[in-house]
Image (tube, grey):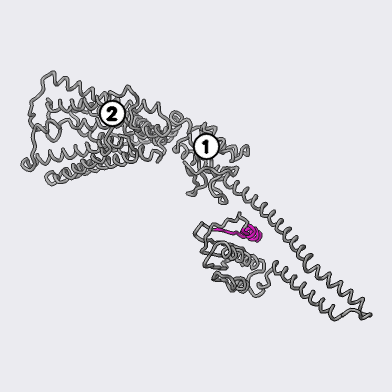
């Protein structure tokens, strides 16, 4: 069925006009305010939802059909208000008995619209070629039914049951044909409901999930004509039972179509279906048990005895828990074998992990086998990682993720292209404890690897520093001291002959000695800045006073232990140097504070950001130096947002 593009908005506009007209007439029919407000609100909501679906799912008539259903609901409510306003004051609004006759069976159009919606749900196509004749047949039968409804033998529908028929009662042939058309229309509506079953058997994935949502309302819709006929047979006319059942059906249709078309993965539809079936059967069993128990006890204790009622209630209370548990298991085994297999696999893995017969890292392989889904991945949220990784440290793609939470905190994800999110949500809840154990083990293994790598970097840095000191001493101070010793020995040997200018040799030796002392001081300054003798503030002030970038220092006045002060100095010095040389910063702030038993070093610049400790900037060495004291180093450096480095160093309180 092809609908013009503005079909749903146009139907929404019609619904709004009918609502406004009905609201204007309520002053003449005040007793209908609540009923009209409820039906009008429901119809407008359905029409608005139809517009949303039409623009969200292009080229699909489901949105227009849902808007049509909403417009009919509003029309029927407004028609009832119009009739009652005329009955209250015939002179207030015009009304022709022939119009009443023609609109007598308009309610069938609501069922026809719903039937067409079921036939085209959810992708806008029919289940197959054999179903092509059904939509026009439904429309034709609805037209014929409305025509026959203009000449009924029974009174018009409420509230116009007292109005005289303008064309008189039909003859026997027309009356018989009207029954044939009614039965045919009911059969076509049942066929529309059956189309859902046919489509469900052929569908997979998203379409199947959408059909499961519609199953709640679709089956009720197809049962509505049966309920109406049953009430007519019992009471002689359609009344309260059919009305209540119809309202519940329309509301269920509205909710299920909206969820199915826009958010089919909002809830676990399988779980909702299972719970609905289970509790319905439980309710029927308890009602039967109560009736049998009350009857049996009533024969003994008396029909109206409170003992009989109390005893029947006790029987129901005893049966509730075991019946519910067994029904849940039976329904799960029948309807959701894959989900049950996954839950049993998780339970078995938990037992084997508890007995040390398996490792929690086997969760991904276990779920793949249970769900028969090789695309399933289990991602762990490890703080040291940029995203989600598996137990081997391989990144897990961040698309189609179902979060795994424990205690309200996300600890991992499940992702798969072959398993629905609803099933993954159930599995994620059951496997949360295993994921947490695997995550903690992975975090511990990562920390141990980092400690080992840090230890190797410290050893390598120590070796490099020792080689540098050896080279500097050998090429610098050591050579000068050797030269000075040789000069002194020459002066000693030539002292008696007076052939050498001893004073010049001594002057040269003193100069060499001064140079050697200066070089030794320079080397020692690389090990520990001598400026720290006057405190951390003085040392950092001496470091920054010649920089072209203004540096704001907020340094605590209390003295620090030597190892803490040296580390704090190098953290600040490295961060300041990087900001001045590489970040093109215009301002730098350094703050050193002490709280309880830890010292915080905080350096912030407004440069270009994007600092990476893996790029050889010296930050990895700082992290090792801070970690050697048992502290931690944090780096926040988004591109274009500046850089913040914070080191936390433990110290004695």
Q: In this view, does 586 lie above or below 329?
A: below
The label number, if any, that marks residue 376 in the structure image: 1
Residue at the top extreme of this rendering = 173
Say left or right for 263 vs 113. Answer: right
Considering the numbered disc 1 on the image, is that residue within a helix, a strand or a loop?
Answer: loop
Say left or right for 450 vs 422. Answer: right
Q: Does the magenta stretch include residue 385?
A: no
Q: What stretch is highlighted in magenta?
A: 617-635
- Residue 298 in view, yes or no: no
What residue is disc 2 on?
A: 223
Q: Is residue 331 above or below residue 40?
A: above
Looking at the image, is mark 2 or mark 1 earlier in the sequence?
Answer: 2
User: Residue 287: where, in percent of width, then height?
Assistant: 34, 32
- Residue 384 in view, yes or no: yes
Residue at the front extreme of this rendering = 499
Between 391 and 572, the one lying in front of the other is 572
User: For the point 33% across and 27% down, which residue is it?
Assistant: 126
Between 247 and 458, the one lying in front of the other is 458
The label nearer to you, 2 versus 1, is 1
> Quadrant location of residue 548?
bottom right
User: For the point 55% across and 42% down, which residue is it?
Assistant: 434
State which quarter of the image contains the C terminus: bottom right
Q: In this view, does 229 lie above or below 557?
A: above
Marks 2 and 1, how far apart at CA: 40 Å
Between 363 and 465, the one lying in front of the other is 465
User: Residue 66: where, in percent of width, then height?
Assistant: 28, 36
Q: Does the magenta stretch include residue 618?
A: yes
Say left or right for 477 vs 563. Answer: right
Between 377 and 426, the one lying in front of the other is 377
């Amino acid at each position: 069925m092809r609908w013009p593009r503005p079909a749903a908005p146009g139907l929404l506009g019609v619904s709004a006009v009918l609502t406004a007209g009905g609201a204007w007439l309520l002053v003449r029919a005040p007793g209908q305010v609540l009923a009209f407000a409820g039906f009008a609100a429901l119809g407008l909501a359905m029409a608005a939802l139809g517009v949303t679906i039409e623009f969200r799912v292009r080229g699909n008539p489901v949105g227009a059909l849902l808007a049509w259903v909403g417009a009919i609901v509003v029309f029927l409510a407004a028609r009832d208000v119009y009739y009652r306003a005329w009955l209250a004051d015939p002179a207030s609004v015009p009304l022709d008995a022939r119009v009443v006759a023609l609109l007598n069976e308009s309610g069938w159009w609501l069922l026809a619209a719903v039937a067409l919606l079921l036939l085209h749900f959810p992708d806008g196509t029919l289940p197959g070629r054999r179903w092509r004749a059904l939509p026009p047949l439904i429309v034709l039968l609805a037209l014929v039914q409305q025509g026959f409804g203009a000449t009924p033998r029974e009174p018009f529908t409420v509230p116009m049951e007292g109005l005289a028929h303008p064309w008189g009662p039909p003859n026997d042939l027309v009356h018989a044909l009207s029954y044939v058309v009614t039965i045919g229309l009911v059969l076509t509506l049942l066929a529309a409901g059956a189309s859902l079953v046919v489509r469900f058997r052929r569908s997979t994935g998203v379409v199947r999930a959408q059909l499961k949502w519609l199953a709640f309302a679709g089956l009720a819709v197809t049962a509505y004509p049966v309920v109406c006929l049953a009430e007519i047979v019992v009471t002689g006319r359609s009344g309260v039972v059919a009305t209540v059942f119809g309202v519940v059906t329309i509301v269920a249709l509205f909710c299920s179509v909206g969820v199915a078309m826009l958010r089919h993965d909002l809830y676990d539809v399988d779980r909702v279906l299972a719970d609905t079936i289970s509790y319905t059967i439980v309710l029927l069993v308890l009602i039967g048990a109560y009736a049998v128990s009350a009857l049996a006890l009533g024969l003994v204790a008396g029909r109206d005895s409170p003992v009989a009622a109390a005893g029947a209630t006790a029987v129901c209370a005893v049966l509730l828990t075991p019946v519910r548990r067994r029904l849940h298991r039976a329904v799960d085994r029948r309807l959701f074998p894959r989900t049950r297999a996954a839950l049993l696999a998780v339970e078995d893995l938990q037992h084997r992990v508890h007995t040390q017969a398996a490792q929690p890292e086997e969760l991904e392989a276990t779920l793949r086998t249970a769900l028969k889904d090789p695309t399933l991945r289990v991602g762990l949220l490890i703080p040291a990682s940029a995203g989600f990784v598996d137990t081997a440290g391989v990144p897990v793609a961040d698309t189609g993720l179902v979060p795994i939470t424990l205690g309200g905190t996300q600890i991992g994800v499940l992702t798969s292209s072959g398993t629905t999110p609803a099933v993954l949500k159930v599995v994620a809840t059951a496997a949360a404890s295993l994921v947490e154990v695997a995550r903690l083990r992975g975090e511990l293994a990562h920390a141990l690897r980092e400690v080992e790598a840090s230890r190797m970097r410290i050893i390598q840095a120590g070796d490099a520093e020792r080689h540098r000191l050896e080279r500097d001493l050998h090429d610098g101070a050591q050579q000068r001291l050797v030269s000075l010793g040789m000069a002194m020995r020459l002066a000693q040997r030539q002292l008696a002959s007076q052939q050498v200018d001893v004073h010049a040799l001594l002057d040269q030796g003193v100069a060499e000695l001064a140079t050697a002392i200066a070089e030794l001081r320079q080397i020692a300054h690389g090990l520990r800045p001598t400026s720290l003798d006057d405190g951390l503030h003085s040392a950092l002030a001496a470091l920054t006073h010649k920089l072209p970038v203004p540096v704001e220092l907020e340094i605590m006045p209390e003295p620090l232990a030597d190892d803490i002060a040296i580390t704090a100095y190098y953290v600040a010095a490295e961060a300041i140097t990087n900001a001045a040389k590489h970040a093109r910063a215009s301002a730098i702030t350094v703050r050193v504070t002490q709280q309880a038993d830890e010292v915080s070093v905080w350096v912030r610049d407004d440069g270009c950001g994007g600092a990476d400790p893996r790029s050889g900037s010296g930050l990895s060495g700082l992290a090792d130096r801070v970690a050697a004291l048992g502290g931690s180093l944090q780096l926040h450096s988004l591109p274009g947002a500046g850089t913040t480095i914070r080191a936390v160093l433990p110290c004695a309180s």
